Structures are given as structure tokens and as C-alpha cells.
Image (spheres, helix red, strand yellow):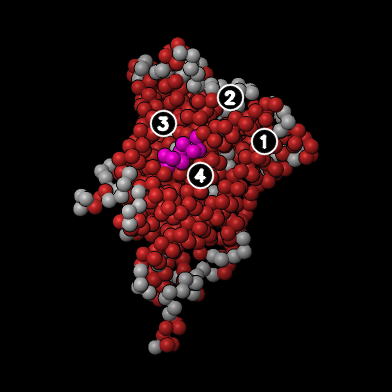
């Protein structure tokens, strides 16, 4: 068995190159973040990450991102279902455009969304008479975060719907279940792990998002300021340790989301027997 | 028997009445999706082009005659031309190592390769400031030797590499995993060298997956904003890439010019989507062919 593992050539070369490149680009610089955070001692870290302005930014970055991920969960499942199950003219076009937020530069999305939702913008001026302001409010941040998280739920749930075997649905139908019952009791439980995985992925992306948010948010302290922007503010004040401490907090949150999503993915694969 | 078979066409995917939603539900769901996508995805794209041409084609074209804009376009091309090939070579090496061999820690390595996707782009810039910046690890040494990385081209390149790090590898690993390596082993028994196997056997098998990974990597490299924003210093005619230039124009209320530059990047995004749709279709076909041939004479 041991001999079979290395039949093909290039193991040392490719793995070695992978590890060296990974270390130089990702691992060593990331370790600088850890070391730099604590260079001015624990107290400085604690003071930085509990400043009222910083704490306010956590709600915008972590809280609104979560709401956006939930909304993406809802629409993402509808989108995945329609794209996987129904055949109608224009389906391929809709399917292709799902990935737009992934391919479109964030700054482009940022200025486009701001223009649409500004007071005189296409949607903004419709909402204005009702007293709904979007640009430069938390609602605007929420919309930008929903936009960039959109592809994740669709793309994790869609293949699972495609792989669902028709047998169980047929069995449910022959046993007298209504279509609604079949969906809630048979299909939805089968999709749940992938839906949660998709939501976790969308959340992970939204938490760190910068480009699409900074334009529409207006960056008002205590209101629409996001944590990544505060990192940049600290850097501009040459407060390297402060910037690193905030980066550290964000990194910890990202790691937790990563762990949760890996766990969900493993659960999904176990459930589906992949 | 024949009657029974025709009532239960188990292999046919088209759902029958009992396992399909009522037409009303169908129409409602499709309409919801179309409206949601129109408002959320198509409208922003439409606005980019509308605003870009709001002052006429002439103004649009004039934007690119501006020296600072022309420089931003050039710089963006240079950054992508360096970072995309480097990540492509890495992606190929990583995919080869991870799919052709079994070794301990493979799962961990997969997570580490994905790491940059999970990290905020701003952190992607921050870490290099901490390493190479004036107050960073190598700051004093770099300064003594008159080497500038932060607020210069090398910083832009390395931050871009970080943000686009996993794209090629992520595209290739599942594909090469699914394809297996029987053909490579066959080529080896016939006396092919490692490079011959790669160029003549593996590369033709993976070319569509590779192309998509490279195109996506390129689109993200040219459009990167957060990470590059941190390391650039926003020096006009020097370290301003297209997305950063969009921000400057926008903040100076040169809205039409900002959207003109944005429209170029949007076209790039659209091309990426088209290539993705095509490459996915080709990669799927390659995979099906591979599965058919590996099944051998069995029907």
C-alpha cells in the first residue's frame, strides 16, 4: 500500500512548492498579525477592542452581516429550487447571473448600489416619500451585505437539490402526503445542512466585506461604520498594534465561522452519504 | 408488465403531477426570483453602464485619455500580469500534490489554502503592512536598503496574490479528484516522464477547469479593492489601480468618469460569467467522458 501511494512523480516538488508559497504569502504574514496584536501588551489590546466606537462597529459588521446571511438563506433556497427544478425560458441566463456579486469588483458594486439607493436614485426616490432612507443608513449596509452574499447559498443548495433522488418524493406522494408536507417533512430536512452551510459561507464573506459597503454606508461613527474601516483608520494614525488587535478580533470571528461551516459541511456529506 | 413500466418511469427526471408543485406555486416562485434578480443583480449592472454613458460616448472615451486614468489601467494590468501567473503555478502544484497523492494533513492543507477567502481583504492588506511597513518587522531593514514594498508595486502585487490565492487551486482540486489518475499511471507505465505526463495527459483533461480558475482569479485580481487600498497609499499616477481610481473619481464627484472606469471592470465580470458557464459545461462533459471510458466495456 505504501508503494502505491507514490506511483506518480512530483510529490516532493509540488507539495514542497505548495508549502513554501503558502507559508510566504499566508502563514508568516498572518502570524505577524498575532504577534503584533500583543506587542503593546494585553491591556492595550483590551482597551482597543472595547472602545465604544469599535464595539458599535461590531454590531454593523457582525450583526447586520448575520441578518443579511439569513435573508440570503431564504431567497437562496428559492433561487436554488427554481434553477434546479423548473425549466423556463431565460433559466440559463438567471443561473449564470447568480455569480455576478462574486465576479463584480466590490468598489463597482459599492458605487452602483449607492447610486440606486441615494435619495435621487432609481429606488431611493421611490422610497423617499415613505420616509425610508437607504443610502448612508444601516439599511444600506444591510443591502450591500445581502448583495455580496447572494451566490453562496444558491451554489451550495443547488447541487443538493439536483442530487435528491425522486424516489423519496414519490414515496411520500403515494403515502398521501400533500406537496407542502413532502417539502417540509422530506425535502427540507434533506436540504437543511446545505442551507446552513450556505448561510455560514455568506456570513463569512459579509463579515469581512469592505469595498461594497464603504460607499453606501457613509461611514458614520456609531451608526454605519464597519470594523474593517476602523482597521484602516488605525493604520492611518500609525497605531499598528491597535489595527492588529482589531484584525485579530475579526480573524477570530472568521475562524469560528470557518469551523462551523466545516462542521456543517461534514454533517451534510455524512447525511447524503457522499 | 409493459403497462406498469409506462406508469412508473423511474429514470425520467421530469416530475409527475404528484411530485410537482401546482402551476400557481411555480409561477409565483419563478416571478419572485425574476423580480429579486432584476432588482438586486441586473439593476446595479444597468446603472453602471447608464451612468458611464450619461454624458455621452465622447465623455466616456475622454475619461481614458486622462493621464491618471490611463496609468490606473496600466497598473492594474501589470499587477494582474504578475499575480495571476504566480497563483496559477501554485494552483497547479497544489492540485497535483493534493489529488495525486495521499498524505497526512491533507484536510488541514485544504483549509489553509482556503484561508484567504475567509479573511477580510482589509486584513489581507494589513498583514503586509505589519511585515513590510515602516513600523513592521522588516521595515527598518527595507528602509536601510532603500527597498519599498508598501505604497509601491510589490505591495500591490503581494496583497493581490493573497486575495486571489485559492481560486485556481479550488477550481482544479475537485475536478482532478473526480477524474482520478489512471491515465497518468498508464502513461507512466508506457515510459512517459513527469513533465510529459503533465503536458500531454493531465493538462488536456483539466484545461477548461483551469481556464475558469484563471479567469476568475484574473477578474478578482483586477477588481480587488480592500486589500490593495490598505497597501497602496493612493498615490495618483503611481500606486492607483482601477478600483482605487474609481473611488477617487467618485469622491471628487466625477460620477460619469468613475462609472466609465467601473463599466470596463463590469465588462470583465460579465466575460468571466460567460467563460464560467462555458467552462463548466465543457468540464462537465470532460468528466462524463472520463467516467464513460473508465467504466470500460460495461454498458
Q: Earlier in the sequence, mark 2 or mark 1?
A: 2
Which is closer to the viewer, label 4 or label 2? 4
Front residue (pair B74, A194):
B74
Measured Cα–Cα span from mark 4 to mark 1: 22 Å
Q: Earlier in the sequence, mark 4 or mark 1?
A: 4
Labels 2 and 1 within one chain? yes
Which is closer to the viewer, label 4 or label 1? 4
User: Residue at the spot x=45%, y=44% of the render?
Assistant: B168
Q: Which residue is mark 1?
A: B261
Q: Position of residue B37 (x, y in %)?
A: 60, 52
Measured Cα–Cα span from mark 2 to mark 1: 16 Å
Check the picture and name the quadrant holding the N terminus of chain B.
Answer: bottom left
Is residue B118 magenta-colored?
Answer: no
Labels 4 and 1 within one chain? yes
Q: Position of residue B176 (x, y in %)?
A: 39, 52
Q: Which residue is mark 3?
A: A25
Q: Does residue A53 appear anywhere in the picture?
A: no
Which is closer to the viewer, label 2 or label 1? 2
Check the picture and name the quadrant holding the C terminus of chain B.
Answer: bottom left
Q: Position of residue A152 (x, y in %)?
A: 48, 48
- Answer with left or right where residue B50 lies relative to residue B274: right
Q: Which residue is mark 4?
A: B214
SS for tag 4?
helix
Q: Circle 4 marks a residue in which chain?
A: B
Quarter of the rendering containing residue B179: bottom left
Measured Cα–Cα span from mark 3 to mark 2: 21 Å
Is residue B89 magenta-colored?
Answer: yes
Q: Residue placed farthest to the left in the image?
A: A1
Residue B239, numbered circle = 2
SS for tag 3?
helix
SS for tag 2?
loop
Q: Which residues are magenta?
A: B83-91
Amino acid at each position: 500500500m505504501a508503494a502505491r501511494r507514490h506511483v506518480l512523480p512530483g510529490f516532493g516538488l509540488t507539495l514542497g512548492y505548495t508549502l513554501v508559497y503558502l507559508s510566504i504569502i499566508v502563514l508568516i504574514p498572518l502570524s505577524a498579525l498575532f504577534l503584533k496584536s500583543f506587542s503593546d501588551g494585553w491591556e492595550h489590546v483590551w482597551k482597543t477592542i472595547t472602545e465604544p466606537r469599535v464595539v458599535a462597529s461590531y454590531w454593523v459588521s457582525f450583526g447586520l452581516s448575520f441578518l443579511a446571511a439569513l435573508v440570503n438563506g431564504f431567497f437562496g433556497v428559492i433561487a436554488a429550487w427554481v434553477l434546479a427544478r423548473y425549466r423556463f425560458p431565460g433559466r440559463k441566463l438567471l443561473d449564470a447571473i447568480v455569480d455576478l456579486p462574486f465576479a463584480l469588483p466590490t468598489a463597482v458594486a459599492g458605487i452602483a448600489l449607492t447610486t440606486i439607493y441615494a435619495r435621487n436614485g432609481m429606488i431611493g426616490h421611490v422610497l423617499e416619500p415613505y420616509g425610508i432612507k437607504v443610502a448612508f443608513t444601516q439599511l444600506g449596509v444591510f443591502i450591500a451585505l445581502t448583495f455580496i452574499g447572494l451566490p453562496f447559498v444558491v451554489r451550495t443548495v443547488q447541487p443538493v437539490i439536483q442530487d435528491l433522488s425522486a424516489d423519496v418524493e414519490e414515496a411520500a406522494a403515494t403515502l398521501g402526503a400533500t406537496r407542502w408536507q413532502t417539502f417540509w417533512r422530506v425535502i427540507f430536512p434533506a436540504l437543511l445542512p446545505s442551507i446552513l452551510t450556505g448561510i455560514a459561507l455568506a456570513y463569512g464573506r459579509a463579515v469581512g466585506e469592505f469595498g461594497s459597503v464603504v460607499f453606501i454606508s457613509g461611514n458614520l461613527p456609531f451608526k454605519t461604520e464597519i470594523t474593517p474601516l476602523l482597521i484602516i483608520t488605525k493604520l492611518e494614525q500609525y497605531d499598528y498594534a491597535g489595527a492588529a488587535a482589531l484584525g485579530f478580533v475579526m480573524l477570530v470571528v472568521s475562524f469560528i465561522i470557518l469551523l462551523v461551516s466545516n462542521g456543517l459541511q461534514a454533517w451534510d456529506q455524512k447525511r447524503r452519504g457522499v | 408488465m409493459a403497462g406498469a413500466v409506462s406508469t412508473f418511469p423511474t429514470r425520467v427526471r421530469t416530475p409527475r403531477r404528484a411530485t410537482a408543485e401546482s402551476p400557481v406555486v411555480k409561477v409565483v416562485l419563478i416571478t419572485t426570483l425574476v423580480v429579486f434578480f432584476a432588482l438586486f443583480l441586473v439593476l446595479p449592472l444597468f446603472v453602471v453602464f447608464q451612468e458611464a454613458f450619461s454624458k455621452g460616448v465622447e465623455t466616456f472615451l475622454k475619461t481614458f485619455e486622462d493621464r491618471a486614468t490611463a496609468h490606473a489601467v496600466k497598473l492594474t494590468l501589470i499587477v494582474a500580469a504578475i499575480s495571476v501567473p504566480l497563483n496559477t503555478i501554485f494552483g497547479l502544484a497544489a492540485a497535483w500534490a493534493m489529488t495525486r497523492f495521499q498524505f497526512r494533513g491533507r484536510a488541514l492543507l485544504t483549509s489553509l489554502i482556503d484561508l484567504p477567502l475567509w479573511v477580510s481583504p482589509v486584513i489581507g492588506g494589513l498583514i503586509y503592512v505589519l511585515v513590510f511597513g515602516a513600523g513592521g518587522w522588516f521595515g527598518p531593514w527595507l528602509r536601510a536598503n532603500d527597498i519599498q514594498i508598501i505604497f509601491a508595486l510589490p505591495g500591490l502585487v503581494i496583497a493581490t496574490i493573497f486575495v486571489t490565492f485559492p481560486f485556481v487551486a479550488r477550481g482544479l482540486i475537485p475536478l482532478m479528484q473526480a477524474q482520478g489518475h489512471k491515465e497518468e499511471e498508464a502513461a507512466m507505465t508506457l515510459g512517459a516522464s513527469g513533465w510529459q505526463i503533465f503536458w500531454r495527459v493531465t493538462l488536456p483533461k483539466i484545461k477548461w477547469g483551469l481556464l475558469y480558475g484563471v479567469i476568475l482569479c484574473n477578474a478578482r485580481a483586477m477588481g480587488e479593492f480592500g486589500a490593495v487600498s490598505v497597501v497602496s497609499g493612493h498615490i495618483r499616477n503611481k500606486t492607483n489601480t482601477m478600483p482605487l481610481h474609481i473611488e477617487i473619481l467618485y469622491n471628487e464627484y466625477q460620477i460619469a468618469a468613475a462609472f466609465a472606469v467601473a463599466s470596463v471592470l463590469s465588462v470583465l465580470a460579465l466575460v468571466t460569467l460567460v467563460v464560467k458557464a462555458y467552462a463548466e459545461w465543457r468540464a462537465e462533459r470532460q468528466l462524463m467522458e472520463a467516467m464513460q471510458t473508465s467504466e470500460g466495456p460495461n454498458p
